Image (cartoon, helix red, strand yellow):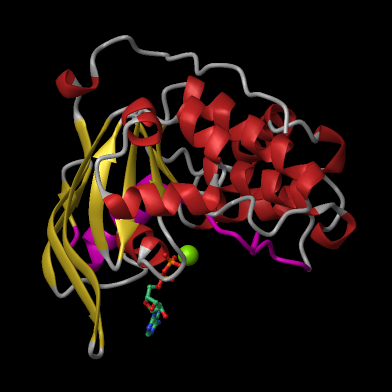
């Protein structure tokens, strides 16, 4: 894969001095007997790009799904942009509006055009006026590089194009945070770059992003910080340089040796 350009940051304020967007304290979750998230502590600052790495089954998807209440936690707390996730339906609704999510499977509505897919939630959830929503949707399609696909159906698009629609659809809600769970894992190799390029452009605009991925070039070049999950725990956290060039834990070394 070709090398990605270095990330352009929209804000030069050091991360420590920025507003906190995501705060997880002592997060624990069980699926029955399986202790799937163990004492996860994590803070993500405004405009930060956090990449989550880790072996299959280590709890990455479960963790990222807790951030917009697609999964419940049994212990600890999660606060998103000042709103704490509890079983209060109002809080959950607030948080879901602010967090866009992109999955491995694009999950577009097959019976709706690309434009309708993008317009649905802003109209029904945000209750924004249709003409404004349509204008934004067309702009977003331009931004992800496929303005000519507006009136097609998902099945007529390539995987890479569908995933770019999924990103545009999430952005149409004007979220403050974007969550990505292995957004390129279901794509043919030649389509991975076009999706990563859109994500990189988004990172350059100062969007706060949490990205589960196995794309090491992306992680190295776009992440501000990387955390490594293993058996439901964060076992190491650092800048890309720290993690890739000077890993501290044996399990990090083992993971990197298997994937690089
Ligand atoms: P990853 O995304 O890192 O591959 P997951 O978060 O999907 O890991 O899964 C972590 C563990 O939790 C795995 O052992 C998986 O089998 C289990 N798991 C995931 N979802 C469920 C569920 N809904 N019910 C029971 N176990 C689950
Ligand atoms: Mg997963």
Q: Residue at x 55, y 44 (%)?
A: 260
Circle count: 0
Q: Work out whether residue 193 or residue 88 is closer to the camera in this orientation and state it.
A: 193
101 falls in the magenta region: yes
Residue 202 falls within the magenta-colored stretch = no
Can see residue 193?
A: yes
* Above or below for 63 versus 7: below
Q: Quadrant of the N terminus?
A: top right
1 shown above or below 16:
below
Q: Position of residue 48 (x, y in %)?
A: 34, 30
- Percent across and percent down for residue 191 are 77, 44
105 in relation to 160, above or below? below
Location of residue 162 with respect to 202 vertically, above or below = below
**Where does residue 211 sit, x and y in percent of width and height?**
45, 45
Query: Measuring 37% from the left and 47% from the top, which residue is drawn there?
Result: 253
Magenta span of residues: 85-110
- Nearest the eye: 127 or 170: 170
Q: Position of residue 128 (x, y in %)?
A: 51, 44
Examine the image and state in which quarter residue 44 appears: top left
**Point 42% across, 41% down: residue:** 175
197 left or right, relative to 88: right
Report the side of 149 relative to 89 (left or right).
right
41 relative position to 95: left or right: left
Q: In the image, ligand 1 is in what quadrant?
A: bottom left
The single residue placed furthest to the top in the displayed view is 12
Q: Nearer the viewer, residue 143 or 218?
A: 218
- The answer, for residue 101, to whether it is visible in the render is no
């Amino acid at each position: 894969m070709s090398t990605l350009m270095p990330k352009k940051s929209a804000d030069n304020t050091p991360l420590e001095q920025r507003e906190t967007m995501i705060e997880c304290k002592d997060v624990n979750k069980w699926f029955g007997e399986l202790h799937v998230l163990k004492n996860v502590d994590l803070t993500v600052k405004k405009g930060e790009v956090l990449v989550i790495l880790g072996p299959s089954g280590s709890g990455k998807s479960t963790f990222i799904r807790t951030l917009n209440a697609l999964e419940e936690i049994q212990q600890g707390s999660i606060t998103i942009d000042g709103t704490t996730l509890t079983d209060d339906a109002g809080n959950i609704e607030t948080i879901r509006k602010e967090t866009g999510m992109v999955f491995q499977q694009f999950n577009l509505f097959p019976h709706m055009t690309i434009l309708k897919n993008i317009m649905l939630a802003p109209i029904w959830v945000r209750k924004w006026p249709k003409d404004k929503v349509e204008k934004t949707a067309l702009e977003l399609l331009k931004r992800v590089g496929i303005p000519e696909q507006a009136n097609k159906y998902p099945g007529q698009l390539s995987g890479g194009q569908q995933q770019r629609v999924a990103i545009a659809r999430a952005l149409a809600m004007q979220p403050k945070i974007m969550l990505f769970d292995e957004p390129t894992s279901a794509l043919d190799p030649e389509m991975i770059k076009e999706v990563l390029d859109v994500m990189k452009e988004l990172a350059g605009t100062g969007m706060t992003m949490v990205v589960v991925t196995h794309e090491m070039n992306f992680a190295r070049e776009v992440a501000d910080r990387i955390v490594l999950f293993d058996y439901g725990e964060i076992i190491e956290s650092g800048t890309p340089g720290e993690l890739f060039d000077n890993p501290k834990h044996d399990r990090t070394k083992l993971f990197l040796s298997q994937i690089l």
